[in-house]
Amino acid sequence: MIVYKFGGASVKDAAAFRNLFQILRGLPKNANPLVVVSAMGKTTNALEMCFGQAFKGESYAAAVQETRQYHDQILRELFPDPNHHVYEAVSSQFAQLEKTLHQTQPREFDRQYDQVISIGELLSSLILHHYLCQQGYQNQWLDARDYLRTDDTWREARLDWAWTEREIASKLPPILEKMAAVTQGFIGRTANGQTTTLGREGSDFSAAIFAYCLQAPALTIWKDVPGLLNADPKLFKDTIRYDEIAYQEAIEMAYYGASVIHPKTVQPLAKRGIPLYIKSFLHPEEPGTVIHNCQHDRIAPAYILKQNQCLLSFHTKDLGFITEQQLGTIFQAMGRYRLKINMMQNSAISFSACVDFDQARIDGLKADLATEFNILYNQPLWLYTIKNYDEPSLEKLTAGKEILLEQRSRLTFQFVCRPPESKKS
Ligand code: ASP
Ligand code: MG
């Protein structure tokens, strides 16, 4: 029982599809993997743009056209026969996209978002399924929504674990006994049949759900980086790769914003002791990183950056001390607006919280709490975290930065600052 997850970069063009096939071909003869795939390249962003325009009542035709051309170009390279039925399958997804965009109303943003954005994964998985078949690699296409049951927390749907596990554990093994299967990451369905998504970058989480429910011996996530690094190489110089790290360490890194794994991915795997391999799809022969049950010495400091942050501060109106009741009111409102607190601090007459910036949510929160507090906010800001920090790493990262808020515990140092001029730290 092998579960492989391939992200957007591993299906970003025709060469990437060919490379993916080579990786599958490298498996032993009777190993039939379950392949979980993300939308191709930057398709999710492109669909977000189409939907944003439709929602505002603007023309989305050009954005749809561009997405279509991107997919068509790859199709033509992969399928020389213009009558191949993949063309029909892709056309019907685009017809569905047009229809959904056409029906978009200026309300219920999150619900409608899920109906549109999920099409990216349907497209990529259909193309991969047909491509593998064409190459003589037998596989079944599965609609992940038939297996992942969620509630209707649109854009961040919560899984019905019991239902999902029952479906996956009973229906998938008989299929995988016969052949490989290709399915989508990121998407699920409510009990009354509406499509949901699990949160941006949620395909990793989907793969972990499948691995958990199948009690798979391992999950491998194929990436464009050589493994789990101590920093994002796009943002930091001189990164190093961890050979192995413990589940808890990985969960914390993901929580602080390490972009290599979706935060919810590791927990279900840890629960069943399923090792998670993070490997490079460009160098599949290299070891990558394994996240599993292990004891290790303190690992090299990990540098994590969250951009697009906002520092909210709540001040009592009468210069009175902040009470626990008032903190309760603030937390409840933040929960209502799904504003995630990444760091917080209180003083005598104020409370500060660093959250992911979202204008609409912050406006709602401010309106709700305006009678009780004076609320100020500051953005765009960056939040840096150093896990397992030491003095040199701390000095290196803070040098020359204007720090607005900082906090340190024994192992973790965090600070909020203005974005510096240069992006590489
Ligand atoms: N395609 C979705 C996204 O880009 C999910 C994923 O790739 O994990 O967020
Ligand atoms: Mg992705």
Image (spheres, rainbow, N blue to C red):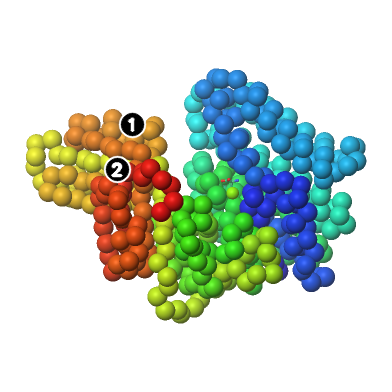
Can residue 183 be seen by looking at this rendering?
A: yes
x and y percentages locating residue 263 in the rendered image? 48, 57
Image: 70 above or below 270: above
Residue at 59 percent of width and 52 percent of height: 203
**Residue at 80% from the left image edge and 56% from the top image edge:** 139
Report the quarter where the N terminus lies.
Answer: bottom right
Q: Where residue 118 appears, x then y in whole percent?
A: 62, 41
Q: Check residue 236 in the rendering and tell me which mark sits there, or answer none.
A: none
The residue depicted at 19 percent of the width and 36 percent of the height is: 373
Q: Is residue 416 left or right of residue 162?
A: left
The crowd level at tag 1 (other Cα within 10 Å; few <14, some 14-19, many 20+) is few
The Cα atoms of the two marked residues, 1 and 2, are separated by 14 Å
Question: Which residue is pictured at 46% across the width and 80% down the height?
Answer: 295
Q: Quadrant of the C terminus?
A: bottom left
Say if residue 328 shows up in the picture: no
Q: Examine the rendered structure and indicate whether residue 181 appears above or below residue 295.
A: above
Q: Categorize mark 2 by other alpha carbons within 10 Å: few (<14), some (14-19), many (20+).
A: many
Tag 1: amino acid: Asp
Figure disc tally: 2
x, y percent for residue 353: 28, 47
Residue on which disc 1 sits: 363
Up-down relation of residue 165 to residue 309 (above or below): below
Secondary structure type for disc 1: helix
Q: Which three-letter amino acid code belongs to the residue tagged 2? A: Leu
Foreground residue, 338 or 362?
A: 362
- Which percent across, then down, holds residue 284? 69, 66
- 343 vs 231, left or right, is left
Q: Which residue is mark 2?
A: 311
